[in-house]
Image: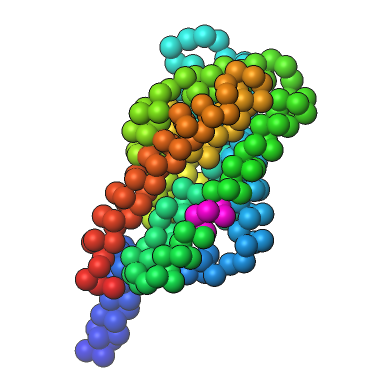
Amino acid sequence: MPEKRSALDKEERAQAEQMTSVKTSVIFEAIRAEGDHELSRSFGALWWSGVTAGVAISLSVVSMGFLQTVLPDAPWTPAVVSLGYPVGFLIVILGRMQLFTENTVTPILSLFHRPTRKNFLRTVRIWGIVFGANMTGCLLAAALLVFGHIVPAPHLESILTISRHYGSATAAQHLTWGIPAGFLIASIVWILPRMDTGGEVLVILILTYMIGLGGLSHVVAGSTELFVLVLHGDLGPFAAVGKAILPAFLGNALGGTGMFAVLTYAQVREEV
């Protein structure tokens, strides 16, 4: 009888360990290991993954345009239109494509863990490659939307309306609105390692929906809207870069790296 009780104790302990939440240090190590892998990838692998991500994330504004076309002008319309915003993020994140705002966390944690000159230069390299590739993909998608006639005219007009709203914000607004957007995307990166596929979808859906609903600035998703305006003749290229893209870039980096990654590393630094 005592032996049976002892066996049950071991079984119960094993079940308790399975039910215990994943430790923060374990999540950190998973993301850091992924960051090391990303930092070692070739230029071509990073570039084409980033270009694909830029094209795919453009489906966010396209989906919002589709919804805006068929919905009436009502107080609740923006809440429903914003349901289209997560579409591009779902494709990019679940498809494991390279998105700049995810890289404000993943390689950064590896750099924090080993702050060497080599890791710093590798981080600058991946930021440069991925951001340039994302912008190229967004520009390609915008050109297809404006010149390729790939969506019906009413949908394109709705996309232009949404893009004009994004493009009307000031540089200071894009900077400040980019900070919470960067923080939210960084939190997705942190949460996903402990999720199954169904959980991943829900996390991405909820958090990116909040970015769209709140009218926050995401440098990659918003760049498609800006490039659409530039190619359509509604906005100058220098205004698009200086007034929106660069401020949103800084805001996303501040929210993702300057806030989320720093605070996250602070809580696990002694454990790792």
| Color style of the picture | rainbow
Where is residue 178? Give x, y as percent.
39, 36
Q: In the rendered image, is residue 231 in sight?
A: yes
Q: Viewed as shown, does residue 132 lie left or right of 33?
A: right
Q: Is residue 104 above or below residue 38?
A: above
Q: Nearer the viewer, residue 171 or 81?
A: 171
Where is residue 81? Give x, y as percent.
52, 23
Please, which residue is most extreme toward the front here?
238
Q: Nearer the viewer, residue 156 or 242?
A: 242
Q: In the rendered image, is residue 68 in sight?
A: no
Q: Is residue 18 above or below residue 108?
A: below
The quarter of the picture where residue 231 lies is top right
Q: Nearer the viewer, residue 47 or 208?
A: 47
The quarter of the picture where residue 64 lies is top right
Q: Residue at x 41, y 35 (%)?
A: 247
Magenta stretch, main secondary structure, is helix
Where the N terminus falls, by quadrant? bottom left
The magenta segment: 126-130
Where is residue 83? Give x, y as percent.
51, 29
The number of numbered discs placed on residues in the rendered structure image is 0
Where the C terminus falls, by quadrant? bottom left
Q: Residue at x 47, y 59 (%)?
A: 124
Residue 28: within the magenta? no
